[in-house]
Amino acid sequence: MRFAVPGIRDASRISAATLFVSHRPRRRFSQLPAAKRQPYWQKIHLWKDVSEEQFLSYRWQVANSIQGTSKLSAFLTNVLPNIIPHTARSESRHGHIKTRNNLIEDMLEGLGKAPMALRVTPHILSVIDWKIPLEDPIFRQFLPLGSNILPDHPMLTLDSLQEEADSPVPGLIHRYPDKVLFLATSVCPIYCRFCTRSYAVGANTDTVAKHSQKPSRKRWEAMYFYIERTPKISDIVVSGGDAYYLQPEHVVEIGTRLLSIPHIRRIRYASKGLAVCPSRILDTKDAWAAALISLSNRGRERGKHVALHTHFNHPNEISWVTELAAQYLYEKGVVVRNQTVLLRGVNDDVDTMRSLIRRLADMNVQPYYVYQGDMVRGIEDLRTPLQTILDLEENIRGTIAGFLTPSFVVDLPGGGGKRLAASYRTYDRKSGVSAFVAPNVKGGQTVYKYYDPVANN
Ligand code: SF4
């Protein structure tokens, strides 16, 4: 799929064929035994006749992603049971949702209040258990219910990490001395309810007018200019939005330009793509993975490091397609790390988090971070108290090799950067207020506070 990039007139002329890679056929799906290659999307009545070839094509995934209220209503009408089943837990929270129509109405109300627009890929829609939607951890991450929404914490702000205040040029966040975040786009293949960057990412919603960072050469040039003139920067995260929504030629263009800067040693592409649309990595008609692999190789030749940082939150997000895609990247030498967000009712129990970490490790995806949920708008139902992440670390450390144990961190509200959750200076569990310091950020004098959700106090 192409989209126009203002000021990038020659982009359309850089075809996949001109990338400095050879396009050999990737891992063939047929190499996997048929018993493992279950058409998990065919559980959805709408897609019961969709072939493996269709489902795995990136074009099909993009064309059949659900976005907007009318597409969502039509999809839900097709996929939900007439009567919504309940467990004791869902009954207590959502007892008023008895029928499919009740649920659709509740969701439309939730969308009206949500800071994030709605877009969900077919892969993710296919791994939701639609027989028990109110208990499903994937449903909970991407589909807002009005009845779930709690009042925001009074100390919460839209740009909770104060990224815009740390941007010397629009779209470039310079917080740590040697690292910058290069926001190349503000579009994603999927929109997460809990996105930290809800102030900028995705389309405007009824509640948030976005400060978008659209792809634009003029803006990218200003960011390159700053990076070239700041020799202490050695590390760059190319993010957004999601690097999956950059054209392959733009992935190459940005990476090549950054690799050519002598003081840049490491580039990480941030993309949830492997988790939410893994077939793209294996789609021989699409050049995104080839672009990443070529940059990874080019970086290695120069003694530099190019990696992919992805974002799985629950083991149910992983299918056989995901495993094949991760294996393909591994065979091609691409380092992949994962950053999980801790979310109430999704992955806030030891068994789920441990299972996720193990599944990632077995796919050779490095479990890198588990983040405490950020204090962003509209998601108080998804945040946990700090104590949850402390308990998870205590119970998980020692159950898997140390190099596969992620760092359990808080990205400090107010722009203090990431600190180990257990490194708090004080934590008053009664009031739910924890305090941290960040000696290497902004002179190190500020005390940063994290506030547990009010519902827990
Ligand atoms: S993919 Fe990342 S940037 Fe995009 S909505 Fe999700 S968390 Fe935000």
Image: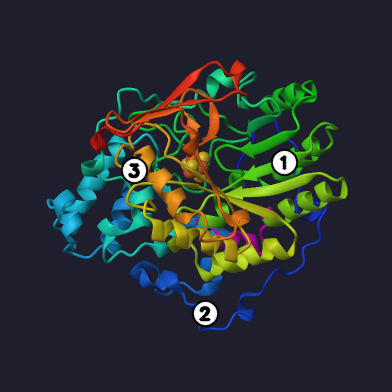
Alpha-carbon distance for marks 2 and 1? 35 Å
What amino acid is at disc 1? Answer: Ile
Q: Quadrant of residue 26?
A: bottom right
The answer to whether 228 appears left or right of 8 in the picture is: right
Looking at the image, is 211 positioned above or below residue 8? above
To which residue does mark 2 refer? 36
Question: Residue 382 shows which numbered tag?
Answer: 3
Q: Position of residue 148 (x, y in %)?
A: 24, 43
Residue sitting at x 41%, y 64%: 126
Task: Check disc 1 and report the residue beneath it.
Answer: 267
- Residue 347 spot, x, y in % from top left: 39, 53
Q: How many neighbours does mark 3 have within 10 angstroms: few (below 14), some (14-19), or many (20 or more)?
A: many
> Does dot 1 land on a helix, a strand or a loop?
strand
Work out whether 209 lies above or below 41.
above
Residues at marks 2 and 3, CA–CA distance in whole angstroms: 33 Å
Residue occupying image coordinates x 62% and y 34%? 215
Instruction: Give, as a single range, the part of the protein colored magenta.
Output: 276-288
Q: Quadrant of residue 40?
A: bottom left
Q: Secondary structure at mark 3?
A: loop
Q: Could you tell whether 46 is left or right of 220 in the image?
A: left
Residue 339 visible, this orientation: yes
Query: Closer to us: mark 2 or mark 3?
Result: 3
